[in-house]
Amino acid sequence: MKLNRNDCITNVLKVLVRQLGEEEAVSAGPTLRMTDLTAPHEAA
């Protein structure tokens, strides 16, 4: 079963919600791009 790009982003956002707290993850979410996934702390 393959994950599509949206599934990957969703999984990353779920991890960010756990790590950063919901408020920070929601504010960072719109700035996320596939190239940012290696350094999510720089996305915000």
Image: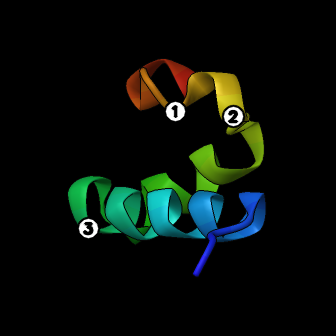
Q: Amino acid at mark 3?
A: Arg
Question: Residue at position x 68%, y 39% from top?
Answer: 32
Toward which corner of the image does residue 4 lie, by quadrant? bottom right
On the image, numbered disc 3 is attached to which residue? Answer: 18
Q: Do the residues bearing badges 1 and 2 touch, measured as CB atoms within 8 Å? A: yes
On the image, numbered disc 2 is attached to which residue? Answer: 34
Label 2 element class: helix
Closer to the camera, 10 or 20? 10
Q: Earlier in the sequence, mark 3 or mark 2?
A: 3
Q: Amino acid at mark 1?
A: Leu
On the image, numbered disc 1 is attached to which residue? Answer: 37
Closer to the camera, 32 or 9? 9
Label 1 element class: loop
Label 2 crowd bin: few (<14), some (14–19), many (20+), radius 10 Å: few
| Above or below 6: residue 40 | above
- Where residue 30 appears, as percent x and y from the top left, is 76, 48
| Above or below 24: residue 42 | above
Instruction: Farthest residue to the bottom: give it.
Output: 1
1 horizontally vs 15: left or right: right
Instruction: Farthest residue to the left: give it.
Output: 19
Q: Amino acid at mark 2?
A: Met
- Where residue 42 appears, as percent x and y from the top left, is 48, 18
